[in-house]
Amino acid sequence: MRARVRVLGRSDLEQAMTLLNANPIENLFVLARVATHGLERLHLGCEVYGLEGDGQLRALVHAGSNVVPVNVDQDNVALFAQRIGPLRQASSIMGNAAQVRMLWEELSRRGSSWSRVREVRARQPLMAISGDPLVEGDPRVRVVTMDDFRAYFTAAVAMYTEEVGVSPMESSGSYRRYMQELVSQGRAFGIIENGKVLFKADIGAVFGPLCQIQGVWLAPELRGQRVSVPAMAQVVRLAQPRYPVQSLYVNDFNTRARRLYHTVGFETVGEFATVLY
């Protein structure tokens, strides 16, 4: 099979969607972006490289601020790394754990900017739930509205800083706009009392019946008090009418969070990894 890696465009959309839909939970981040914006850089904001063999799209890499490999393997990883190049502009490599490791190692051999990392999260269980939660929900959890935005944004910044290790605040205001978008679309949930967010969770990527839950956070003073389990169960219940299949991924070393999601009813369906710069 003769294979080449090239930039994908509008004419490749059908094949790209077919490839992504082969494993929609694992590929949800890229699937949601491509379904919404297409493959053209002008609309998507980045290039998507595709491996074409015998006229068929076999693998691809979303090459934006998040580099995400799809169907990358030992036979094609060098071709993708060569096309991406030695100079890094991305802030992370994320996705299927085996593919992330392969691509990161290959890119690191080609440029030191890829090898100098802030953190490698090598094992992140990918979990999903497609039925009712196994426990009762906390009725205090509700859909957040724009009236709550100031308090919710404060909690979102705290969550991001704690989880990622750096603040999301920057001059362009993109993180604030992103959070405003989630809230305005009814994709943010929380317990808010006396103007303070006690618990929060967001729905990030969405496609058809699928969604990915992110940004789960509990106020530090409530941790260890059995608040998270019923709160998370209520998020699942509130999201179910729009998104019957919900997924998330969690660091393997975060045993408390893994136990929380398992108790709610999430099951492990794969493994992610993230390389942070």
Image (tube, rainbow, N blue to C red):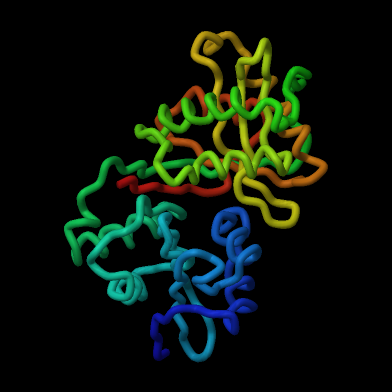
Q: Is residue 262 in sight in this rendering?
A: no
Residue 117: x %, y % from top left: 25, 46
Q: Residue at x 61, y 12 (%)?
A: 226
Between 35 and 20, the residue placed more toward the observer is: 35
Spot the residue most to the front.
171
Q: Residue at x 53, y 25 (%)?
A: 154
In the rendered view, would you say 262 is above or below 176? above
Residue 16: x %, y % from top left: 58, 74
In the rendered view, would you say 140 is above or below 169? above
Quadrant position of residue 200: top right
Q: Is residue 46 in sight in this rendering?
A: yes
Between 227 and 166, the residue placed more toward the observer is: 166
In the rendered view, would you say 5 is above or below 67? below
Q: Residue at x 53, y 44 (%)?
A: 126
Residue 136: x %, y % from top left: 77, 21
Quadrant position of residue 236: top right
In the rendered view, would you say 59 is above or below 133? below
The number of callouts visible is 0
Spot the residue most to the right.
241
Residue 139: x %, y % from top left: 78, 19
